[in-house]
Image: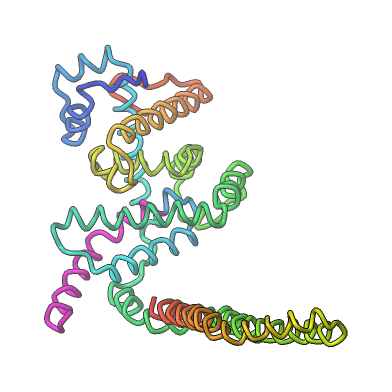
Amino acid sequence: MDQESKDSWKEFFTEFYQKYSRPFWLYIFKICGDENLAEDIFQESFLRFLKAEPVIVSVIHLRSYLYKIAFRLIIDKKRKIKVENRVFEDRKKALKENLYTESRENRTHISEEMEKTFQLLKPKERILLWLAYVEGYSYKEIGEITKCKENSVKVKVFNARKKFAGLLREKRQEKGEKIWEKGFVI
Amino acid sequence: MGKRICHLEKKIIDSLKREGLTQEIRNHLAVCPDCEETAAVYLWMNRFKDVGMRDNISLKKLPEAESIWRSAHAHPRREKELLKKALKPIVISRITSYVVFVIGVIFLLFSNFQEIKNYAVTNIGASKIFSSLLKTTVQLLPFFLIPMAIIIFWMLFMAIVTAWEKSRA
């Protein structure tokens, strides 16, 4: 890469980073549920992204490429250090026991409640729901990010959604509220 | 698989994004439990994101683009050095094992010859067999040594190539 294209790539990256780093951070943090792990994955994702020097087809394409990197990192970290059993479980346990203090003073009660509910899902389910409903990716795009076939993604999202809707229902019932009112006041 | 994915699912999500549910969609939601769940989960997820964004935790200071850029472009050399350092014991042990192998083969070859030689000295019949065997071996030795040398050199070459590729990675 010559100096001129390097400069324009740097300029593009800076703009891209400023625009998308915040939602990307939120995605990783909400999926991992652990600030330190999320920080590692966040930085590593951008480093890998830069090292790969992807061809700029479109910003959407680059964004999904970044999510693809992050997906692999989350899953790999989970496998390697058995995050499922250590970090995620510890966090689940800590949330249950009300011991989780990380930035607690800065959080609202509602956010904590929602996090507790979200952490009841498996990491892959969290990723699928986030990509489908928050990022607004199509099943095909999610398939590309998670290296799954479109039909398989449809089924997985369907199952995750069913499971999560069931959890939300339980939570509501615990509080003695209706499952959800017409007009979706959740 | 028996999974029922409603054909209106995408339409419902699009409507929710625009925050404008048409009467047709509202009617459908009243009768389709799957779409009702989709809408509920969609709204919950987006509220979760909004709450997260509003929370101070989402205002956490992220590294600057410049620092990410710098570390991405400074890392390769450092990584190479670290990889080389990490692989050093493996490379050394591999080369040592080849050397030991070669020395071992030579040693075994000659020590066995010595045993046969001693046996041959005490036995006249065997002596004749030994001398003819020795002649044949001497004649055959180059033919045996050449392929063996080729194999050893090939192994050494492969070890060097592997070490070089690892240091490049």
Q: Is residue B79 visible?
A: no
Image height of A163 relative to A37, above or below = above
**Could you tell whether A150 is left or right of B24 in the image?**
right
Picture residue at 57% right of the left edge, 44% below the top: A92
Q: Residue A161: x, y in percent?
A: 38, 30
Image quarter for residue B73? bottom left
- Tell me where residue B112 appears, x and y as whole percent: 75, 82
Count of numbered tags: 0
Most common SS among magenta residues: helix
Whether B53 is drawn above or below B38: the answer is below
- Evaluate whether residue A171 shows in this view: yes
Residue B4 drawn in magenta: no
Residue at (45% x, 82% y) in the render: B157
Asked whether B129 or B62 is in front, the reply is B129
Locate residue A64, reporting x and y percent.
Answer: 25, 52
Magenta includes A10?
Answer: yes
Quarter occupied by the C terminus of chain B? bottom left
Q: Position of residue A109 (x, y in %)?
A: 47, 43
Colouring scheme, one of rainbow, by chain, secondary structure, one colour? rainbow
The quarter of the picture where residue B48 lies is top left
In depth, the one of B112 and B157 nearer the eye is: B112
- Say which residue appears at 49% left-offset and 56% top-offset: A77
Write down the region rendered in magenta.
A1-28
Nearer the observer, A28 or B109: B109
Which residue is farthest top? B31
Q: Is residue A153 shown above or below B81?
A: above
Quarter of the rendering occupied by the N terminus of chain B: top left
- Residue drawn where x is 36% and y is 40% of the image: A128
Q: Of B131 and B45, which appears nearest the observer?
A: B131
Please tell me in which quadrant of the rendered image residue B9 appears: top left
Q: Which residue sits furthest right?
A: B122
